[in-house]
Each structure stands twice: as structure tokens, then as C-alpha cells.
Amino acid sequence: MVAIIPLTSELRVLWICLVWLHFPIGLSFKCNEKMLHCTTSLFISNSFTMFHRTDGQLFTRDRRLFAVSSGKEVPLQGVITADGWNVTRKLITANGTMPGPDIIVHQNQKITIIVHNHLLSEGITIHWHGIEQFGTPAMDGTPFVTQCPILPGKSFNYTFTPRIGGSYFYHSHSGVQFDMGLFGAFIVLRHRDPIPFERQIILQLYDWNHHIDSEVMFKSKTIPHIEYHSVLINGKGEFQNNTAPLQTFYVDKSERYLFRLIAASLNEYFLFSIPGIRFTVIETDGNEVVPLTVDKILIFNGERFDVELELTNVTEGRYEIFVDMVDGSNLTIKETGSPGHAFLYVTNKMSLPTVSNDSSTDASTLVLNCAFNEYYKKPNWTCLPLSTLNSANHIEQIHITEKRNKRSSYFLNLSFRAFPTLIGASINGRIFVNPSVSSLSQPTEVSTSCPGCNSTNQCFCSYSLDLETGTEVVFIFLNLDDLNFHYIHPMHIHGHKFQILKESKTTIDASGHVTPTTDVICDENPCKNIFKWTNESWNDYRNIPGINIENGVYKDTVAVPAGGYVIARIWATNPGVWLLHCHRSLHLAIGMAVMLNESYENVQVPSDLPLCRSFLNKEPESLPLRTTSNVPCDSATDISTKAVTTDKIQADTSVSSEKESSMFGSGGDTTALAIIIILCIVVCILSALLFFIIHQMRKTKSRDLY
């Protein structure tokens, strides 16, 4: 059992002291490869952009920071600059930084992250985006689906074992906290990774509005036309050439380098490029692929791509990295916002020759992950769909329950509609509303019925699909609504990776008209929420032309194009309650989601997982299935949970001497506390000594004057 370290009054005082001193608590955490079990902590609190604790509000000039009050230069350390806009905006951050600290673990290594909620007014949960949580569904971090929110002043012990290597990230799944800066990288290293970690560079891409709080945007009359001012790379960007501080990276031609691209984006999607340097895609969403060299990549919300830089034909010098916000209908760069911008310095320590490359002209530009077959404003670009990538079939096949020779198929129509009085995003006409209890731990108190919802009417409910144990489940994602807006929906699944069997891309003409697919038709008139294949033989998906069962790429996030569809499959062998939703923040917030109730009879839930419910001042009609604990979510207790494992996946059950570790080694937070206290004492002593020396120098200078 992994115990929670209580948040004592001493720790609270120390936290306040560290914030006041701007102690760099946002350092990355990397687990020692030899440890069976590692432990670290995330402290969730408010932070502020362009603000220094002692010097106050800041402004930017020539990639440097200056205090508004005094005009003196202020060091970058401890300051969240965002895009350099000199009006302070409130954030919600992990360990005082945006992004939060990188968390680096190794494949099949157990990790405990203790999340402490230091916010005054809001509950939180942390979702580990892309981590399947095999056997540990209660650790997924989805409010009112897998857990109750962590209330202010409380803590939650997230313990799980990442089984599949790759680039992932963590973020708040509560309300719009993700939009306020609560995210960070989560990397799972493999022994077979071709490039050592020392030459791997993480780039977290984030769209940013420096004026308005996200909740205000979502509830204002500007929906659905939310504008973002800039794109941040690892929390840094610029706005209208204000020369704000930017990220800088250094590489050498003699070595191999990996860029881990993480689209921690909210509502925009990006075009990533390094003019003058091509790159080879070797992995996406934790799935190693057959290498493919391209010039640019379209990256949608929640996706990750690992690319190796091609430096053979590159000369020494400074290159620029650009991450542009893209207009969905014509692949042009949005004029309303500033692109993400960073610098890449290439050296040539071994004096290697530069090989000329005659294929780098605009006529041969290869763009991966296009949403349409072609873009009329980019006639010289070659668009490659995601299905161009082939899985290298190295992905680990993990099944908590046995596979069965049975199949289920679901047509899921994705819709975003903005009416004068109603704004809603839906799946099959159902606008998702969070349950009022935790679905995983209080299943008998959840109503998933959708009364009044039929083929023509939308409704509000906690929409759910029941997935039978061990079955092959095929999803057909349709995007046939509101084609005039050209919305692209990046669909993200918790608890699984889809295998992408087919993408159906569509064509958009010069007038902006999308020609929708004819492969799918409505099963009724008027056409709303019930669909079927035009060709009935396609009910067996193996008869569909272009289907790729052998090496279709595996993804936990896939973009569904306007007017088209995506066929994806999973096996219902990971018991739990999993959310399937659009990863555009606005679309999720207003209802584009569905719960997958998978093999619930085999779900294992920690016995002391807190419960939560609305108080209606009446006897409940039914009792929860679990009676071993009845601790309400709003009780004044911290929780301590066990990692939920099964015999099929628990690799270290025979190890009786398993120990916990933190970034400070054995002893965990106790050792960390001691080290931090010592550092604080050292800082205080050095400060006192510095003041004493300055005082003595002034006295000496005063004597010299006389």
C-alpha cells in the first residue's frame, strides 16, 4: 500500500515560504530506472503571468523582462511569461509553472503521484492523457466518471503502472482548468528507444488567450467564435512581435535528436514546421510506426508525434521553429493570432559535410495528417492522411479479460450546433451531462437514460454505451453535421488505443463547399441521429474497401474530418468506465462525450475511494453497490488508495521488499522536506551574509569620504 503523506501545517507553511521565495519547485521528475516504484508530488495552486513576487508586474523587451515599477531587468527564472502580454492573468498550475514539471518514468515501472489541491475554491482531478490504466480505472482522473473531484485542501494518491512507452501528458479534467495552464508532459521511456533520453526534446504546444478567462469565453455570446492570441511552446511565445522570451534548443549534426511534439491545445489545431529542416515521424500516441519523412505535420488537440530531425543536409546556424494556428477549410495560417515561435541552433562539432537536398522546394512539400484530400489554396502541397502511417506492430497487446469471438458496431454522429438560445455539442443527439456521483464507484446512483431523445430531438443526459466483456468493438465516427463550419473533431478515448482501420477524407472546393461522403446514409427522414452503410455488405467491416487490419496505426486521439468518417476498433478487455469525447475544450465542455461502461462486472475499485452525491434531503431510492466505505467526497479526510492490479498484469507481486522512492531517493517526502528546509536555511544565511557585506562596504566607503 502506498500511503499519503498528510499535508501538515509545517508543509503548508513551507509551501507558502517557497512560493514567496520563488523557489524553483517546478523541476522535472525522472524516475531512477532501477526503482520498482517511484513517488513524486504535484501541488496545484494559482499562479500569474508576467508577474514577479518582489518586483510586481513586468513588461518585455529584446527577449528580456523588466519591472514596470522600477524599469530594472528581472531574471526569467520563476516567471511565467506566456506570450509576454503585460497584463497579468490568473492561472491554475502544477508546482507553480506552466507547463507543470515533466514526469519521466520507464515502461512497466509503477509510479505514485500525490496531487495536493491548494486552490481555495475549486475541486480538481488530473487525467493522464493516453495512459490506458490497465487494471487501475480509478486512477484515470475523470471527474464524476472515475472519481470525485479532489476538494480544496485535500490530496489524492494516483498510483498506476504505464505499460506502453511513448509521449503522453497530464492535465486537469475538471471544468476549464486545463485552459488555465494546468498541464504537463508525461513520458514513458522504453529500453528499445533508438535515441537516448539526453537527446530527446519535449515541445508542448498550447493555444493562448491572454485577455479572457476560459469560463467567461465559454459562457459569453462570442461562442462559437473564440479567438486565441498566440501559440505557446513550453509556455513561451510572443504577441505581435513584442520580442518576448522564447524557447531555444541546441543540437549538433553528429548526433541523432528526437522531438516529442505534444498538442496540449484547447480549441485550435496546429501546423508544425522547421523551415530548412525535414523530420522523420517514428511514433504517434505511443505507437511506433514505419518511419516516414515529411516537411510539416498537422497536429490536432491531444495528439502526439515523435519525430527525428534530419540534419544531414543542414548547415550550421540558427533555424526557426513555427507552430501556426490553421484555418480548417483552406490550410492557411490564421491572421488573428501570433504563431508559436522558438529557435533551434545547429552546430557541427565534427565538421561533417553538408549533403545537398534538391527536393526541398515548395512543390514537394509533404504535409502529414491532413483533414481533407487536398486544399485548393495549397496546390503544390502533397497532403498525406494519417492512414499513410503504418504501425510497426511493436505495441504491447494487453488484455485484462479474455478476448471473445463477438463483435459490436456503433455509428457515432458528432454534432456542434450554435443556436440563438441553445449551444450544444452532442453524440447521436445526446448532449452529455456529468453524473452527480462517481460512476465507477457509485454505479447504482447513475442514470444513463436519455428521455425525450430520439432520432430528431437532442437531449441532455449522461449518455453511456455498454460494452460486453471481451468483444471486438468497432466505432464509426461520423462528422456530417454543420458542414459549413468545417469543424474537425479530435476524438479521444480513455482506457484504450484505437486501431485506425480507415479514414474517409472529403474534398473542399474553392467556394468552401464540402462534399460529404456517400458511404453512409440516414436510416430515416428527416436525417438526424440514425445511420447505416449504403452498402449493406459493409456491416461486416472486413468487406469495406481500404480497410487496414494488418498494420493500421494505433491512436488514442484521432481527428474526424468534416463530411467524412473514421473507422476505429478496440477490444473490450480493460474493465472500467471510460470517457470518449472530443478533445476540443469547448466541445467537451458543452456535451460532446459518451461514457463507455466496459465489462463492469470485472471492475476493481479501491475500497476507500471517496464517494460524492447531491444532498436532496430524502432517503436514497437505492444503495450503492459498495458498502465497505461510505465516506462522502466532501468529508474532511485525505485518501490513501492501493494500486489496483490483477494477476495478469502485476509484474512485481513476488517482490516483498518493494520500496517507494521520490526524486530524492528512499524516504520520499520526508527526505525532500529535510533537503528543502536545509536549502531555505542556506538561502537565508547567504542573504544575511550578503546584507552584512554590503553594510560593511558602505561603512568603509563612508569612512573614506571623511
Image (cartoon, rainbow, N blue to C red):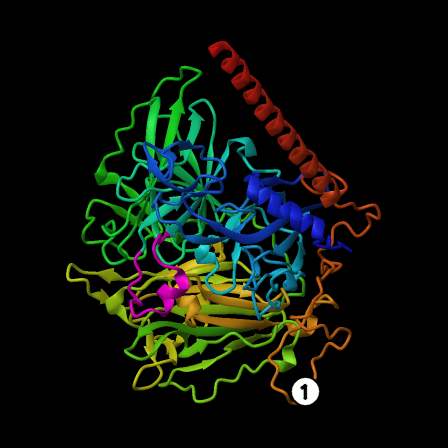
As rendered, which of 61 and 13 lies closer to the eye? 13
Q: In which quarter of the image is residue 661?
A: top right
What amino acid is found at the position of numbered circle 1 in the picture?
Ser
Farthest residue, direction front: 706
Q: Main secondary structure of the magenta part?
A: loop
User: What range of the chain is rendered magenta?
Assistant: 208-227
Q: In the image, is residue 672 above or below residue 546?
A: above
Q: Mark 1 — residue?
A: 622
The location of residue 385, given as percent across then percent down, is: 35, 53
The location of residue 498, given as percent across then percent down, is: 50, 60
The location of residue 15, given as percent across then percent down, is: 62, 47
Task: Determine if residue 186 is in view.
Answer: yes
Task: Determine if residue 26 is in view.
Answer: no
Name the side, left or right, on which 129 lies relative to 427: right
Name the side, left or right, on which 512 lies relative to 433: left
As rendered, which of 277 and 160 lies closer to the eye? 160
Residue 250: in magenta span: no
As rendered, which of 257 and 358 lies closer to the eye? 257
Residue 209: in magenta span: yes
Residue at the image point whose x is 52% and y is 64% from the top: 174
Q: In the image, is residue 446 above or below residue 561?
A: below
Residue at the image point whose x is 51% and y is 78% from the top: 462
As rendered, which of 649 and 443 lies closer to the eye? 443
The location of residue 688, given as percent across then percent down, is: 62, 28
